[in-house]
Image (cartoon, rainbow, N blue to C red):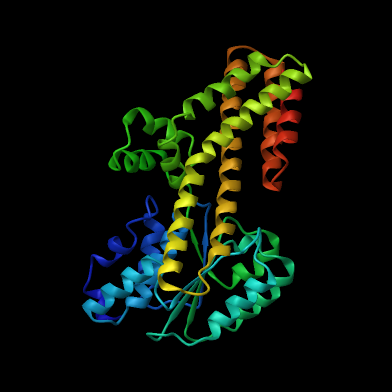
Amino acid sequence: MSDALTTDSAVAPDVFGAVVGQEQAVARLVAAAVDPVHAYLFLGQPGTGGYQAALGFGALVLADGLTDEGAERARRLALEAKHPDLVVIEAEGAALRVEEANEIIRAGQISPVEGSRKVIVVHGVDLIQEAAIGKLLKLIEEPPASTIFVLLAEDVPPEIITIASRCVTIEFGPVALPIIEAALVGEGVSPSRVKMAAAASGGDLARARLLANDDALAGRAELWVSLPSRLDGRGVTVWELVNQVRDGMDAAQEPLVARHEAELAELEARVEATGERGSGRSQLVARHKREIRRLRLDELRFGLATLSRVYRDRLIEADDRAAGKALEVIQRTAEQLVRNPNEPLLLQGLFLELE
């Protein structure tokens, strides 16, 4: 064990400061950084801290053995994803393709620039295309001696079970609501907004932060609550309500779009100032598309959960067979979300079946 890791007890809280409510995962990573294995799988939905933990883990690994000043610099650069020996790879489209797998292979084969180790962080391994699976598996099975892989995934579908079996799995569960509430309060969010934002977040701290600044959240919740009393079996009514729900989702998307525009502007300003090549614009745009898709799915889950509570309350008050049937329809609709369905058709089908 190096002096850098044993003598600085503040290292772990420092590098994992952005990882909230994941004490067990952080403790495992602090211990693992002493003598890391070749590959880790960070398992959890976006917003639970997996990516920030990957940067923190990389910070510990790349700072290990350095003097105080060198270690501080290595940690800072790693946490900003700017360390030359920390490589972050994201798909340019909806899934990791052969092109990205080849990029991972190339990055892994290049010797570290500054130290004896390199950390490669790969987003969305659970979305890898079939043609790229074999390439990534071979790399994980026969890794370069100096390279540590951190693979990020929401779950482990059958296609990547073999890859997952070659990794040490670190799980990041949904962040508990009291922890999310405490984090929002600590960031200065108004108490009147904290509970609703936390409840609608689904255990995703990043989404909770977005919702905490969303003036229309209460209105969207009220729209979903009002649906059972407004649905009358007529197609025109269904179409009007579908449009209202989607308009609300569009409005919910606006803060995220504003952040995306700021990130692109910052990237373009840096490119203009430095003339750097390979700026990562296509990866940034691809990530923005994934984040918007994720937000809209989260909004649908939030709406379906809100709607379910209305029908559950009806079922508790009386033996309401229609409410029981509605709950089955809502559950069936929620299960379809994993297939990234067409929004208008999904909502039309749901509203037509509800009573």
Image vertical order of residue 299 relative to residue 39, above or below: above
Locate residue 21 relative to residue 159 in the image: left or right.
Answer: left
Residue sitting at the far front? 272
* Residue 199 image point, x, y percent: 46, 34
Does the rendering let one see residue 13? yes
What is the total number of numbered labels drawn onto the structure image?
Answer: 0
Q: Is residue 5 visible?
A: no
Side of 193 where 293 appears, left or right:
right
Q: Position of residue 113 (x, y in %)?
A: 42, 85
Residue at image position (74%, 29%) is 348
Please tell me which residue lies in front, 113 or 260. Answer: 260
Residue 229 percent coordinates (x, y): 64, 13
Position of residue 132 in the picture relative to residue 192 (left or right): right
* Placement of the N terminus among the 4 image quadrants: bottom left
User: Which sits in the foreground, 100 or 126?
Assistant: 100
Name the one closer to the observer, 232 or 24. 232
User: Residue at coordinates 76% horizontally, 19% vertically from top-left?
Assistant: 236
Q: Is residue 27 left or right of residue 89?
A: left
Residue farthest to the top, as pictured: 318
Q: Quadrant of the C terminus?
A: top right
Residue 74 position by quadrant: bottom left
